[in-house]
Amino acid sequence: MKIKSLHNKWLTSGFIVSTAILMGSNASLGAGTTSQTTTEESAVQSMEANVEDTEATGETTEETESEFYKNYIKGKLSIGTRIVYRSLTDGDSGAKGGLQGSGTFLGTIYALDEEQNYAPTKIFLGYDFTKYFGIELAWDSMEASTKATSIYSSEIKSDGEVSLYGPTLSLLVKIPNKTQFTPYGGLGIGFFSADFDESADWALGYQGPSHYESLGSPSTPFNGHTRSMEVDSTTAFLLTIGVSWFPTENWFLDLSGQYVKADTDATFTSFQDGVQTGTPQTGNFPMDNFAVRFGIGYRF
């Protein structure tokens, strides 16, 4: 009887301990599950908040960019390019056959003949501060070949080509109206660099193109004689009048006339076997011209 009583007590105690352990384990597991669930919910909420903040920031940036475009770009900024036909207004000195100091531009150069270039490379950028006033920044260039008489014969030759190129800046006044055409006028200034592309026969000291070609157009100087021409950079004055046609809201065609006053100084120097001979001669090339310009552009 005692043995059976002890056995029953042991089973009862084991059952109580096992139950306690099991309940504790379930409680711990329940707490862990609850904690994990809470952590996952917090992470999801944080991610949702970040997404909302990102979307809000993106919307703000887009709104800011939209406002900037609307206030400072749309209907104000334009870009385009032009082709140009030029006519020199003072390309003949009236001293054909003369020498330096007798009315020629320089040496025996008595005339300039404009060179036409119809490539659409005259790029321009315009900006309207108001519907009446704006500015235009453009790239321009012009070329003219020289005409001279040979001191050795009656041959008319070219010593080389004069080139001016550089940026221009103009203030424009516009006349808005209810039509698709907008007349305008402008005053501006050009900042031109200059080059002189010498003819080979002249630079190498030959008597003229015929003399040079008769000797096989050599690449060596004639009896060690060479010539050079330096042309100075210049600042030009611009006067413009034109009209823009807008067949659509953004695209436009442009037709204008422009007077360009752009004289440039030049210096001629001769050499014998690489040593300067005599005093350099100075002169002036009048590159003043009237240009007819046709352009196409896009207004944002």
Image: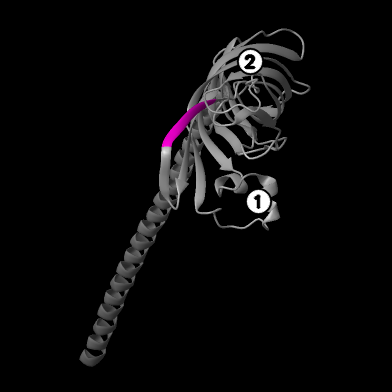
Q: Which residue is mark 2?
A: 240
Sequence-wise first label, 1 or 2: 1
Q: Amino acid at mark 2?
A: Thr
Depth check, mark 1 against mark 2: the one in front is 1
Task: Identify the image quadrant of residue 164.
Answer: top right
Q: Residues within 10 Å of mark 1 (few under 14, many from 20)?
A: some
What secondary structure is the stretch in magenta mostly built from?
Answer: strand
What is the distance, in whole Å, between disc 1 and disc 2 at their CAs?
Answer: 44 Å
Asked if labels 2 and 1 touch by Cβ distance under 8 angstroms, the answer is: no
Rendered location of residue 112, percent (x, y): 65, 28
| In the image, residue 226 lies in the stretch drawn in magenta | no
Q: Residue 251's image quarter?
A: top right
**In this picture, residue 79 sits left or right of residue 85:** left
Percent position (x, y) of residue 140? 60, 30
For the magenta stretch, what is the residue range?
A: 279-284
Residue 288 in view, yes or no = yes
